[in-house]
Amino acid sequence: MPPQLPHVADELLRRVAADQYARGVRDDGSIAGPDFDLMRTVDADNTAALQRIIDEHGWPGHSLVGEQAAHAAWLIAQHAELGFQLDALVLLRGAVDRREATPAQLAYLTDRCLFHQQRPQLYGTQYRDIGDGNGPQLWEVADPDTLDARRAEVGLGPQADYERTIRSTY
């Protein structure tokens, strides 16, 4: 089924392409160094555009913009400031309830918000590099003994597999 708002879908896809380019992801799959100045500019512009889209249409979910563009909206929210992320979290939760977004997207945004609030995350999606030469380290997790069960509930694989992916990527 085509999206209800293809012009919004196109805008979101263009914006997420700029987001990824600023972060060093190239169309051919290669990775360059991130451009932090460009990231700040793109993130601010993308956040303002996503806020406009939300104000006009609500959360851009699957039926409104298609799965790819809905994913793009989520990624833009992931890279926004905490205040916007917290607002988006509420909207995304409703979108998940309506099957307009995925539980995994909600898990990632939940963890991102908790990370920015310096609180333990729930799903083990957030890492940080503390500059000790050991690469990215898992941010603190609440109740680590049940982490893989929580991850499974939202469609995420085991933490050990995710950590291998993170380490091989970075």
Image: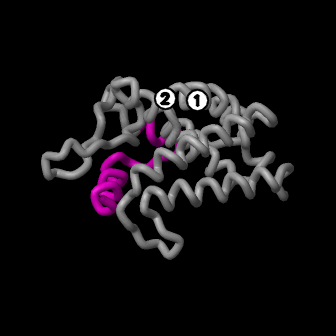
Residue at label 1? 89
Residue at label 2? 82
Percent x, y of residue 77? 57, 39
Closer to the camera in the image, 18 or 85: 18
Closer to the camera in the image, 59 or 14: 14
Percent x, y of residue 24? 42, 62
Over which residues does the magenta segment extend?
Answer: 149-170
Residue drawn at (36%, 52%), measured in percent from left and top? 162
Mark seen at residue 52: none
Residue drawn at (56%, 36%), measured in percent from left and top? 106
Which-is-in-front pick, marks 1 and 2? 2
Percent x, y of residue 6? 82, 55
Residue 128 is covered by the magenta coloring: no
Residue 169 is covered by the magenta coloring: yes
Mark 1, other Cα within 10 Å: few <14 / some 14–19 / many ≥20: many
Q: Is residue 54 above or below residue 18?
A: above
Percent x, y of residue 79? 50, 42
Visible residue check, residue 153: no
Closer to the camera in the image, 8 or 159: 8
Comes first in the chain, label 1 or label 2: 2
Q: Amino acid at mark 2?
A: Leu
Quadrant of residue 126 within the rendered picture: top left
